[in-house]
């Protein structure tokens, strides 16, 4: 009996990409000694994504899908898909074919080494991306690797092939505030990377705007580093010391020279500067407190509205 490969595919408004993705994956399937299981996750799409998934699941017994009650985000979709897999090996892929399916052949060959638990992929170029997005992406990896406790590979994608043992370890992490790139590294296990050049989407448009990516990167820093809290503490201490030194200088000048301190505009600027620092530090602390508050509510990471099993039961 052949081993099973589970393919997890998050989808958000990807009606055009789904047939193209499945056709490309079937070409790869014929070149691997594996049975394939597809787990598509409809992350609250507003187009005909769910209709396409219903058709595919109806025609193919190895295709399964989950449809969320609303948009919960890619991290929730990945977790849901991974939770519903049964394969000996598991891979996560973007449906827009920016993750080259043919790499799975080399990835499978590498993971046959018993010392390797995961084969990841990383882009060596960002051709087609806006320059400002590429710049901030590189800066994010530099910052997170300098201040974080978990090393993240620049250009690494969610697209990877892992063993069941590694997946089980990842599923043990039940946190709501998820940042998969960090979680994949945090659990450990031996990972090697394949490099490839960036590819354009085959259809549709991306739902990731610059500000969504920026917010996502902030979440990654907060989830895997307490350095911002240390910086806030350092800035607060530095401001306090600076204020004490300034007061001593003013007192000395007044006693020694009888020089009254004048210039209220400069004082207002100083007050505004100190106030701004305080608000910045409070904002950093508030970000961490907000994450804690979200975790303590223990809300589900996602809510499923429909699955292919329900659809098949209706047809029966």
Image (cartoon, grey):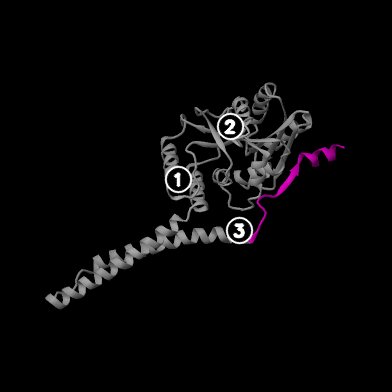
Label of residue 45 in the image: none
Instruction: Classify residue 170 as left or right of residue 63.
Output: left
Q: Residue beneath label 2, please?
A: 204
90 above or below 68?
Answer: above
User: Label 2, label 3: how many angstroms apart (C-alpha)?
Assistant: 34 Å
Cβ–Cβ under 8 Å for marks 1 and 3: no
Q: Is residue 16 visible?
A: no
Classify residue 145 as left or right of residue 170: left
Quadrant of res 4: top right
Q: Which residue is pictured at 56% across the width and 37% down the height?
A: 191
* Viewer-closest of 309 and 238: 238
Label of residue 295 in the image: 3
Crowd rating for badge 2 (residues with CA inside 10 Å; few <14, some 14–19, many 20+):
few
Q: Which residues are magenta?
A: 297-316
Secondary element at tag 1: helix
> Mark 2 or mark 3: which is in front?
3
**Marks 1 and 3, how far apart in space?**
25 Å
Sequence-wise first label, 2 or 3: 2
**Which numbered mark, 2 or 1, is in the foreground of this view?**
1
Q: Which mark is residue 145?
A: 1
Residue displayed at 77% across by 29% down: 60
Q: Can you say which quadrant of the picture contains the N terminus?
A: top right
Asked which quadrant contains residue 116, the reply is top right
Judge the density around disc 1: few (<14), some (14-19), many (≥20) Cα neighbours within 10 Å: some
Q: Position of residue 95 (x, y in %)?
A: 62, 33
Examine the rendered structure and indicate whether residue 150 appears above or below residue 93: below
Quarter of the image where the C terminus is located:
top right
State the image coordinates of residue 142 (x, y, percent, origin top left): 42, 43
Of the two numbered discs 2 and 1 on the same chain, state the one appearing first in sequence.
1
Q: Residues within 10 Å of mark 3 (few under 14, many from 20)?
A: some
């Amino acid at each position: 009996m052949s081993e099973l490969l589970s393919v997890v595919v998050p989808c958000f408004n990807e009606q055009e990409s789904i047939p193209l993705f499945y056709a490309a994956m079937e070409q790869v399937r014929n070149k691997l000694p594996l049975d394939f299981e597809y787990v598509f996750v409809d992350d609250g799409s507003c187009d005909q994504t769910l209709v396409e998934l219903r058709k595919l699941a109806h025609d193919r017994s190895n295709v399964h899908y989950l449809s969320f009650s609303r948009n919960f985000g890619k991290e929730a979709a990945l977790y849901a898909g991974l939770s519903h897999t049964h394969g000996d090996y598991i891979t996560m892929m973007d449906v827009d074919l920016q993750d080259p399916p043919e790499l799975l052949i080399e990835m499978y060959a590498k993971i046959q080494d018993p010392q390797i638990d995961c084969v990841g992929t990383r882009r060596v170029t960002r051709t087609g991306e806006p320059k400002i997005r590429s710049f901030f992406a590189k800066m994010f990896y530099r910052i997170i690797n300098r201040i974080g406790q978990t090393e993240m590979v620049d250009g690494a994608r969610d697209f990877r092939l892992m063993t069941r043992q590694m997946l089980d370890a990842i599923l043990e992490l039940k946190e709501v505030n998820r940042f998969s790139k960090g979680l994949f590294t945090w659990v450990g296990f031996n990972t090697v990377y394949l490099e490839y050049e960036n590819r354009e989407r085959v259809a549709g448009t991306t739902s990731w705007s610059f500000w969504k990516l920026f917010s996502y990167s902030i979440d990654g820093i907060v989830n895997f580093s307490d350095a911002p809290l240390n910086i806030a503490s350092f800035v607060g201490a530095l401001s306090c010391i600076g204020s004490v030194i300034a007061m001593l200088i003013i007192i000395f000048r007044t006693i020694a020279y009888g020089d009254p301190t004048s210039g209220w505009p400069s004082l207002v600027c100083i007050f505004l500067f100190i106030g701004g620092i305080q608000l910045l530090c409070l904002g950093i602390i508030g970000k961490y407190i907000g994450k804690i508050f979200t975790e303590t509510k223990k809300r589900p990471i996602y809510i499923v509205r429909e699955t292919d099993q329900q659809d098949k039961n209706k047809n029966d």
